[in-house]
Image: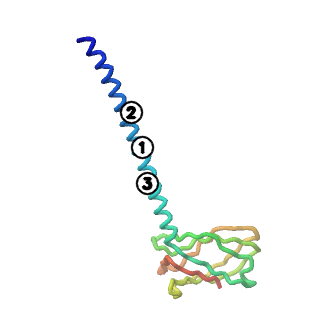
Amino acid sequence: MKKIILPLLVLSLFACNRVKDKATSAINKTGEIIGESSSELVNGISNGIDKKYKCTFEIPENEKFKGLETGIYEIKSNNSGRENVISLYVIFNEDFKQNILIKAFNEENLEYGRKQIDLSGKKGEAKYVDISFNDEVKIKTISNFTFE
């Protein structure tokens, strides 16, 4: 009887370890799949948010705006939570110092906001410029901003 119990005990211990290893492997694989799915979900949401806003910035090609160009932008909220601030990356390819008028137009090309700002920068400089429109203005998801 003792000769039978010892091998059964060894076999059951080996079987338990094997089951434990399989369970651990399955849990790890499940964790990897969930992690990958979560990353894909976050990336998808981020891409959707990036595509949500389609704003353009028109700078006239004349002497007043010589050397001025724009890069990326972000729509921000003011202190009361209203999305009426554009944080625009401005690149100065020439020395620039002007008072400019920026107008906001919706997708039907109707004006819905304007802001006058003093803009200045040295040649080779680039910086973010916050353009705060009136509290009544809420930046539209598809907008065109003109510089005058």
Q: Is residue 114 above or below residue 85?
A: below
Q: Earlier in the sequence, mark 3 or mark 2?
A: 2
Q: Tags 1 and 3 in contact by the CB under 8 Å rule?
A: no
Does residue 16 appear left or right of residue 39 in this picture? left
Question: In 3D space, how far apart are the residues under numbered discs 3 and 2 (Cα atoms)?
Answer: 25 Å
Q: Nearer the viewer, residue 141 or 117?
A: 141
- Mark 1 nearby-residue class (10 Å; few <14, some 14–19, many ≥20): few
Quarter containing the N terminus: top left
Residue 86 location, x and y as percent?
56, 73
> Measuring 66% from the left and 78% from the top, which residue is drawn there?
118
Identified by mark 3, the residue type is Ser
Q: Nearer the viewer, residue 26 or 73?
A: 26
Q: Which residue is mark 1?
A: 29
Q: Nearer the viewer, residue 58 or 138?
A: 58
Q: Tags 1 and 2 in contact by the CB under 8 Å rule?
A: no
Identified by mark 2, the residue type is Asp
Disc marking residue 21? 2
User: Residue 98 occupies which quadrant of the picture?
Assistant: bottom right
Nearer to us of marks 3 and 2 is 2
> Measuring 33% from the left and 28% from the top, which residue is drawn there?
16
Q: Residue furthest left?
A: 1
Judged from the image, the secondary structure of the residue bearing numbered disc 3 is helix
Identified by mark 1, the residue type is Lys
> Measuring 34% from the left and 32% from the top, which residue is drawn there?
19
Quarter containing the C terminus: bottom right
